[in-house]
Image (cartoon, rainbow, N blue to C red):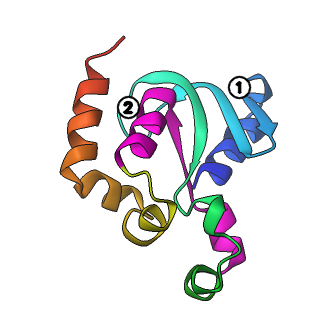
Amino acid sequence: MCQQQCKAIAEDGNNDLVTESNVGYDVLMANCELCGREQTLTGHHLIPRAVHTKKRFIKRFGKAEMRNRKLLVCKLCHDGIHDLVEDEKELADDFNTRELLLEDERIQKHIDWVRKQK
């Protein structure tokens, strides 16, 4: 998701909004896909890079899908996801889509709190 959105932003002539880093794309200012706030965004791998070499995940998702399945999120949302779900395998198994993240009560409470921040 993130990669296509970032490329679309860049292709629309907004190259100043998108930079490519060693972990993917960083968007300088856009709306977070979780809280909706306009912030500097980073790509959150829905299937964490730590499991990309594990046979179980390669078989389940495929290498390309693991690399490309991302969300553009603000720092508060990104940090919250990793603080609330520390286990990378649990993230890959149980939180590998935006919808699955939003279904979790802990993450939803965190996002509600983030929306109240500046």
Q: Is residue 36 above or below residue 117?
A: below
Residue at the spot 73% in from the left edge and 28% down from the top edge: 14
Left or right of 36? Residue 73 is right
Q: Residue at x 51, y 21 (%)?
A: 39
Label 2 SS = loop
**Residue 97 x, y percent position in the rendering:** 42, 62
Q: Quadrant of residue 48?
A: bottom right
Nearer to the camera, 74 or 81: 81
Per the model, the C-alpha gap separating discs 2 and 1 is 17 Å
Say whether residue 82 is magenta.
yes
Is residue 71 toward the left or the right of residue 112 in the image? right
Q: Amino acid at mark 2?
A: Gly
Q: Which residues are drawn in magenta?
A: 62-84
Q: Considering the whole magenta stretch, tell me its main secondary structure.
A: helix
Q: Is residue 35 above or below residue 6?
A: above
Kindly state the secondary structure of the residue where label 1 is placed.
helix
Q: Are marks 2 and 1 in contact (CB under 8 Å)?
A: no
- Amino acid type at mark 1: Leu
Q: Is residue 10 above or below residue 91?
A: above
Q: Residue furthest bottom?
A: 59
Q: Which residue is mark 2?
A: 36
The quadrant holding residue 49 is bottom right
- Sequence-earlier tag: 2 or 1: 1
Specify the label residue 17 is tagged with.
1
